Amino acid sequence: SAVISQKPSRDICQRGTSLTIQCQVDSQVTMMFWYRQQPGQSLTLIATANQGSEATYESGFVIDKFPISRPNLTFSTLTVSNMSPEDSSIYLCSVGRGPYEQYFGPGTRLTVT
Amino acid sequence: ILNVEQSPQSLHVQEGDSTNFTCSFPSSNFYALHWYRWETAKSPEALFVMTLNGDEKKKGRISATLNTKEGYSYLYIKGSQPEDSATYLCAFRSGKLIFGQGTELSVKP
């Protein structure tokens, strides 16, 4: 298994500002993922962040809006840039182990006013 | 576009009731089907990973079945307890995880 922590757990931000979410894992992992759940919607993959390479973004998500850093095998950040109310969501960090295991952090609940 | 559907969207039951939810997924390019339990402000907890047609898995009062040919999985909870209240997510693995919208279960004492 993997124990994942995220900071902050929640935040209320003003339109036009940016927020950086931190994800810390208790052990080294190759594959890290960032997800978003907008109100009433499914968990949706934003990007895959592997250490030593550029993050790979899913359709509909761009690096300018959601820059990601992956400086080592236990840590990653996701920045939500130039926020609008539509960015109000729960953002989750996730790690993969092997072909079938995937674990999630507790999420960051973001409200943009 | 791969679509994963869960039903019902929400469910309210009394303590002691047994209940079940459905997850429908594409029947082609199947790799695995995941079930997670997600309580508010906590990490989604992995319940089951199912890979073979006909798989049946059990964890305490919770069990799940898998039919990959017709593209559905059932999650059963026997004798629901208030602590079972959570959102239950299924996710279809085809390269990446594709999630359904979840079934929100509320168990009243």
Image (cartoon, helix red, strand yellow):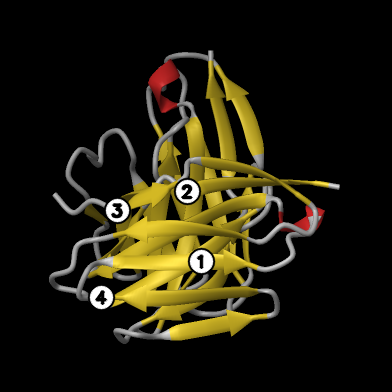
Residue at mark 4 shares a chain with residue at mark 3: yes
Tell me the element at label 4: loop
Residue B104, quarter of picture? top right
Side of A46 relative to B12 (left or right): left
What residue is rendered at 51% in x and 79% in y?
A28
Q: Which mark is residue B4?
A: 3
Q: Which residue is mark 1?
A: B75
Q: Earlier in the sequence, mark 3 or mark 1?
A: 3
Image location (x, y in percent) of residue B84 = 72, 58
Q: Are marks 3 and 1 in contact (CB under 8 Å)?
A: no
- Does any portion of residue B47 appear in the rendered image? yes
Name the chain letter of the residue that bears numbered label 4: B
Question: Which mark is first along the chain, 3 or 4?
Answer: 3
The reply to whether dot 2 and dot 1 touch (C-beta < 8 Å) is no
User: Do marks 3 and 1 share a subunit?
Assistant: yes
Callout 3 secondary element: loop
In the rendered image, the vertical position of residue B16 relative to residue B6, given as above or below: below
Q: Residues within 10 Å of mark 2 (few under 14, many from 20)?
A: many
In front of the other: B5 or A8 = B5
**The disc labelled 4 sits on which kind of residue?**
Thr
Q: Label for residue A24?
A: none
**What distance separates the C-alpha of mark 2 from that of mark 4?**
19 Å
Q: Is residue B43 above or below residue A52?
A: above
